[in-house]
Image: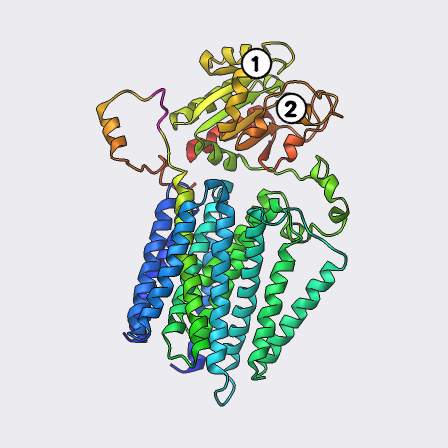
């Protein structure tokens, strides 16, 4: 593919990505603003792929290598940290049974012992 | 692995990132979404690894181990309350990585005969510029939230002029590079001034506005990554970066709207009158009020563990006690612990609230008197004020000049979040300002208490 053809193709997916980005989060409750910010933060950790390419390419001198290496370090910190922080935030949205009203049943206790992580009981329909 | 095959496989991370964003915007699936995103990221890394082949694979492995270990340990160790600054930190390093990629590319390309293509050098300039601003700006945001430096806006005369001048230097270096001047030092000048600009741009913004700023810088890093994608001709960087750039921009605007402030007001609000009155702004005057929609409040309530209702005269006027009871039942069905905090002078007569709530068949053990209720607020997720005002006014505790100073109050400001149901911003019975309404933890749900509660019930049911 010639360089110009590639460029046109890249610009096309860029524009589509802009609209898609707006579209997918067009209605978010305030409650989720911080986790969503953190989640998108993890996604731009994809920069680590670029850093890998740079470090993996034949390098000219030590400077080139060091800069590429640093980019890989920073990029992977972004990826791992981003996803872990987001997961910890979202863990808080887990529901607990009300202690007072829970009937004492064996099954309930087994569930708890297994550490079941229940997703909040919300209907699937997007509101 | 051929480029075509790699690009084909990159569709997996692209799709998973889109799903991740989609799922993240709904509380029920948010965690699943994040996990899908993480799996997609893993696929992207593995595909890239195979594509690169064996050249310097050990350097990549060591680099990823160091960065990944730092990220994992920092993210695991951090306290829940320190999450925003962690996001800032990880956002900053992402931006830094984009800027470093640009540096490495220029260093590798430049002495070649013939200038690089205009679009490539434009992408290099953009990723270096935006990445560097995002890096240093996020670091300042991190330092502010971590209280390494003061959270107060830092201002000085001519600030805007200095910032503009620095940005002009960066832009000029960028234009020179794009127009074909082959000098690596130009990129250094660009990165240096962009770093400085990032610092100076975030310094004047107050600590309370940091989440909005981090969200904006997050969108910046996304843009920088997309630019890196053009530089390296890599689809997954372009799509993922731009997704974050676009959704991050929208998210920033939504956060601003939720705080009832425009983005311009957040970014440049510290200039002008606030800089002179910085101390005065710390008191109740000049704060802004955040209003929320019933839908937002419903979600907040549904995902709380403990909710305390604080009824006042407004509840009596609107005759909303039955609706409040219904709302409480719905919340309890969802597993939320619900109690009512009754101030002795709430309403117009002693026990006014107890009577009304008893009428609505609220179980008596759920009604807490002030002395019993106050120690509970610090472990309350959401305090819902239904038509009460003076009995929750923190001035009674803090402000000696206030007419109600010394009156015992319900310490709702100790709860994690406060929702105030109120008809308008008119001061209450005693006619005094209530700093609770300007508290950053507080959101206002304007309207008649009965109508608001009915809306909450409807939204909660459809959730």
Asked whether the viewer can see residue B91, the reply is: yes
The part of the chain drawn in magenta is A97-101
Q: Is residue B455 above or below residue A21?
A: above
Residues at badges 1 and 2 in contact (C-beta under 8 Å)? Answer: no
**Is A4 inside the magenta-drawn segment?**
no
**Placement of B346 over or under B337, stated as above or below:** above
Question: What is the x, y in percent for residue B323?
Answer: 50, 21
Examine the rendered structure and indicate whether residue B50 appears above or below residue B422: below
Q: Quadrant of residue B171?
A: bottom right
Q: Which residue is nearer to you in this view: B449 or B242?
A: B242
**Residue B389: image tag:** 2
Q: Of helix, strand and loop, which mostly describes the magenta segment?
A: loop
Residue at image coords 35%, 59% = B41
Disc 2 element: loop
Q: Position of residue B461 (x, y in %)?
A: 42, 31
Q: Which residue is mark 1?
A: B353
Co-location on one chain, circles 1 and 2 = yes
Instruction: Identify the coloring.
Output: rainbow
- Subunit that carries the residue with mark 1: B
Location of residue B125 by image quarter: bottom right
């Amino acid at each position: 593919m010639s360089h110009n053809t590639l460029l046109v193709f890249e610009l096309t997916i860029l524009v589509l990505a802009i609209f898609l980005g707006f579209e997918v989060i067009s209605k978010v409750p305030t409650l989720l603003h911080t986790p969503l910010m953190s989640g998108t933060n993890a996604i731009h950790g994809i920069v680590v792929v670029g850093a890998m390419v740079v470090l993996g390419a034949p390098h000219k001198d030590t400077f080139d290598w060091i800069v590429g290496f640093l980019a890989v370090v920073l990029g992977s910190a972004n990826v791992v940290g981003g996803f872990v922080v987001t997961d910890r935030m979202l863990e808080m949205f887990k529901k607990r049974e009300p202690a007072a009203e829970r009937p004492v049943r064996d099954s309930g206790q087994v569930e708890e012992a297994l550490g079941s992580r229940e997703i909040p009981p919300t209907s699937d329909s997007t509101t | 692995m051929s480029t075509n095959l790699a690009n084909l496989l990159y569709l997996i991370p692209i799709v998973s990132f889109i799903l991740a964003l989609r799922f993240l915007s709904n509380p029920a699936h948010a965690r699943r979404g994040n996990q899908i995103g993480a799996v997609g990221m893993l696929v992207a890394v593995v595909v890239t690894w195979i594509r690169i082949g064996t050249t310097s694979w050990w350097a990549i492995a060591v680099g990823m181990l160091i960065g990944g270990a730092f990220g994992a340990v920092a993210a695991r160790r951090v306290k829940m309350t320190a999450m925003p600054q962690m996001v800032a930190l990880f956002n900053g390093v992402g931006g830094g990585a984009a800027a470093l990629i640009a540096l490495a590319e220029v260093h590798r390309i430049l002495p070649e005969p013939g200038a690089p293509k205009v679009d490539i050098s434009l992408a290099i300039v953009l990723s270096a510029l935006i990445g560097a601003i995002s890096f240093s700006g996020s670091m300042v945001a991190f330092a502010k939230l971590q209280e390494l430096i003061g959270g107060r806006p830092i201002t000085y005369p001519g600030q805007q002029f200095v910032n503009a001048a620095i940005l002009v230097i960066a832009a000029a270096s960028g234009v020179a590079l794009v127009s074909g001047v082959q000098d690596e030092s130009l990129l250094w000048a660009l990165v240096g001034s962009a770093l400085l600009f990032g610092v100076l741009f975030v310094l004047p913004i107050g600590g309370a506005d940091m989440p909005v700023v981090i969200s904006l810088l997050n969108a910046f890093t996304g843009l920088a990554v997309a630019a890196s994608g053009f530089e390296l001709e890599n689809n997954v960087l372009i799509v993922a970066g731009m997704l974050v750039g676009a959704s991050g921009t929208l998210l920033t605007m939504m956060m601003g709207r939720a705080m009832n402030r425009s983005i311009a007001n957040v970014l440049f609000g510290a200039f002008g009158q606030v800089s002179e009155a910085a101390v005065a702004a710390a008191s109740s005057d000049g704060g802004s009020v955040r209003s929320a929609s019933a839908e937002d409040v419903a979600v907040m309530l549904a995902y709380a563990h403990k909710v305390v209702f604080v009824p006042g005269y407004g509840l009596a006027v609107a005759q909303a006690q039955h609706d409040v009871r219904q709302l409480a039942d719905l919340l309890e069905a969802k597993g939320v612990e619900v109690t009512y905090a009754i101030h002795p002078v709430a309403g117009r007569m002693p026990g006014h609230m107890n009577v009304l709530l008893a009428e609505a068949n609220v179980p008596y053990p759920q009604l807490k008197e002030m002395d019993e209720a106050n120690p509970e607020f610090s472990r309350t997720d959401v305090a819902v004020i239904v038509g009460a005002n003076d009995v929750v006014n923190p001035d009674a505790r803090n402000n000696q000049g206030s007419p109600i100073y010394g009156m015992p109050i319900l310490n709702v400001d100790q709860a994690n979040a406060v929702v105030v149901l109120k008809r308008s911003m008119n001061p209450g019975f005693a006619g005094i300002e209530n700093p609770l309404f300007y508290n950053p933890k507080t959101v206002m749900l304007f309207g008649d208490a009965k109508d608001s509660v009915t809306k909450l019930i409807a939204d909660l049911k459809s959730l």
